[in-house]
Image (spheres, rainbow, N blue to C red):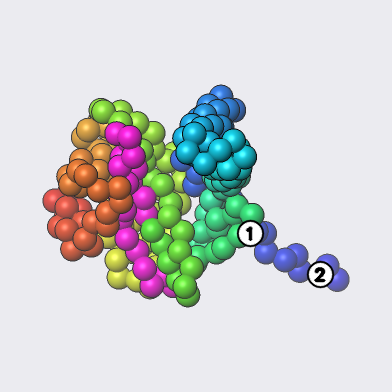
Amino acid sequence: MTEPQPPAEPERIPLTLADPSRRRGCVTVAVALLFGAAVGGVVGLIFGQTPGLITAAVVAGTLALLTWMTARRRIWLQGTRVVAETIGSKVVDLRVVDRLDLLVTDVRGVRTVGLLVGAKGKSINIALAAYSGTGGRELGILALRRLADALAGSENTSGLVFSQLLVAQLRAEARGEAAPERPLFQLASVAPQGKLAQRLRTDAITRFVAKLP
């Protein structure tokens, strides 16, 4: 008698928006070294050569470590679970999330729209799109579709709103609309300037989604 086979693992869908190009990584490391040297030089002029060298090494090393950790960060969707991995890993199941927020960060003219999901004291920020000027980068069609499906089945009442938002984004892309006409771009644009990171109110997002075609 043939033994039943265990169910197959759900497919891993990457949710990483950042560009992992080697050139960008090299530039970031070079900037970290230059910044560390500059800070160390100032400290060296005031306190002497040895403190300056120590400061330069600490600053450059810290920035390089942060860059390395960012480059190693991977996020993917597996069924209804969002998994984030850097050195360790953490998992948030979208079926039972107790926190769903839309965040907009503004760094050097690049606005990133992220979905912050949280449950049982763990939280993961999923970058949905990053815009600069009238263009930018967005998560792929498959990733947005699977994420929308998982959110639609969430026990959190806000899950359906965010699912509808992602579906509207997919429809806009299917119609060939330019970035400024897409929902995520419009939400990024209405966020007030001058703040590094801000949370958009869920009720405002609900009203926005209700007016989408």
Q: In the rendered image, which residue does mark 2 sit on?
A: 3
Amino acid identity at mark 1: Gly
- Please give the name of the residue rendered at 38% of the width and 45% of the height, measured from the top-left corner: 128
Q: In the rendered image, which residue does mark 1 sit on?
A: 88
**Is residue 98 shown in magenta?**
yes
What is the secondary structure assignment of the residue under circle 1? Answer: loop
| Image coords of residue 62 (percent x, y) | 56, 45
Q: Quadrant of residue 97?
A: bottom left
- Please give the name of the residue rendered at 49% of the width and 34% of the height, measured from the top-left corner: 45
- Please give the name of the residue rendered at 75% of the width and 65% of the height, measured from the top-left corner: 5
Q: Is residue 201 above or below residue 119?
A: above
Q: CA distance from mark 1 to mark 2?
A: 35 Å
Mark closest to the chain's N terminus, 1 or 2: 2
- Please give the name of the residue rendered at 23% of the width and 62% of the height, measured from the top-left corner: 202
Q: Which sits in the foreground, 204 or 31?
A: 31
Is residue 112 found left or right of 25 in the rendered image?
A: left
| Image coords of residue 88 (percent x, y) | 63, 59
| Image coords of residue 27 (percent x, y) | 53, 27
Q: Quadrant of residue 149?
A: bottom left
Region in magenta = 95-115
Report whether residue 168 is seen: no
Q: How many marks?
A: 2
Q: Is residue 142 above or below residue 132?
A: below
Amino acid identity at mark 2: Glu
